[in-house]
Image: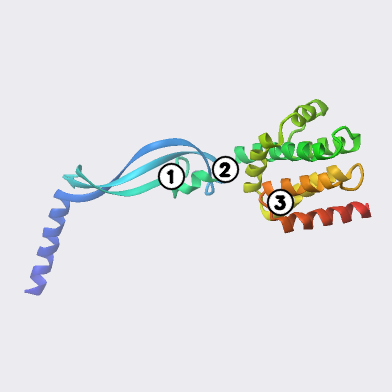
Amino acid sequence: MLAGSAPAGRQKGTTLLIIFGLRVFYRTIAQGTFHCRRCGGDREYRHRAGRRWFTLFFIPVIPLTSVGDHVQCTTCRTRYVTEVLGQPTTAQMQAALPAGMRAAVSAMLRSGDPSSPASRQRAIEAVIGSGVPNYDEAMLNADLMQPFEAIRPALNQVGAQLTIQAREWYLTEVIRIALADGSLSEGERQAALAIGLDLGMTQAQVIGVVAMTEQSAGRD
Ligand SMILES: [Zn+2]
């Protein structure tokens, strides 16, 4: 009796599933470019919102609960939580590094003597090293015209993308500009602190980097 009723129950269940069902359907609500960790590069994405539907003969007839959004790479099909869109793309990171360095070197030069040939040379080398091979005196002069408040977002952006070690390296490059024409003035120390804070460093970290850079410059 038990053996006979079990297959009958399964049969009934299967029939019901064919007629009624629940299925999640997705629709694309936005598209764009993001950095796909699986692919290891910038890829196109689809931002999709899902909703569970009550289906009848596979046709969605009644919308039910929302199942949330996700971001899907159109290349490898990997799904991510939507927070992934807050991460910079490779192209944005490549642009942020030199933009941040240009902001930092002009802030540092202005806090000391912006006409010092040794400091200017060091500043141009730092910007070229960050990825602007054609950076020259004219471009530096144009950057020096920018008010500090206008260049702060570039520092914030690059700071958010760098590791702690990379921020320290970045700040070291900037301090060497001020040290190129002699020891640090009080204004240059203040500039190093402002740049470090805008990069997301703590005051203690900045003071440590300043002390180490001064020491290594003294040994050279
Ligand atoms: Zn991918």
- Residue at image position (44%, 50%) is 81
Q: Is 115 in front, or is 44?
A: 115
- Residue at image position (81%, 29%) is 136
Question: How many labels sit on residues?
Answer: 3
**Hey, which quadrant is residue 207 in on the image?**
bottom right
Q: Contact (CB < 8 A) between labels 3 and 2? A: no
Q: Is residue 81 left or right of residue 61?
A: right
- Residue at image position (35%, 43%) is 49
- Residue at image position (12%, 59%) is 11
Relative to 12, is 118 above or below? Answer: above
Location of residue 201 in the rendering, given as x and y in whole percent from the top left corner = 69, 53
Q: Which element is circle 1 on?
A: strand
Q: CA distance from mark 2 to mark 1?
A: 15 Å
- Residue that label 3 marks: 166
Q: Check the image and tell me how it is coloured.
A: rainbow
Q: Which mark is residue 88?
A: 2
Location of residue 40 in the rendering, given as x and y in whole percent from the top left corner = 57, 46
Q: Contact (CB < 8 A) between labels 2 and 1? A: no
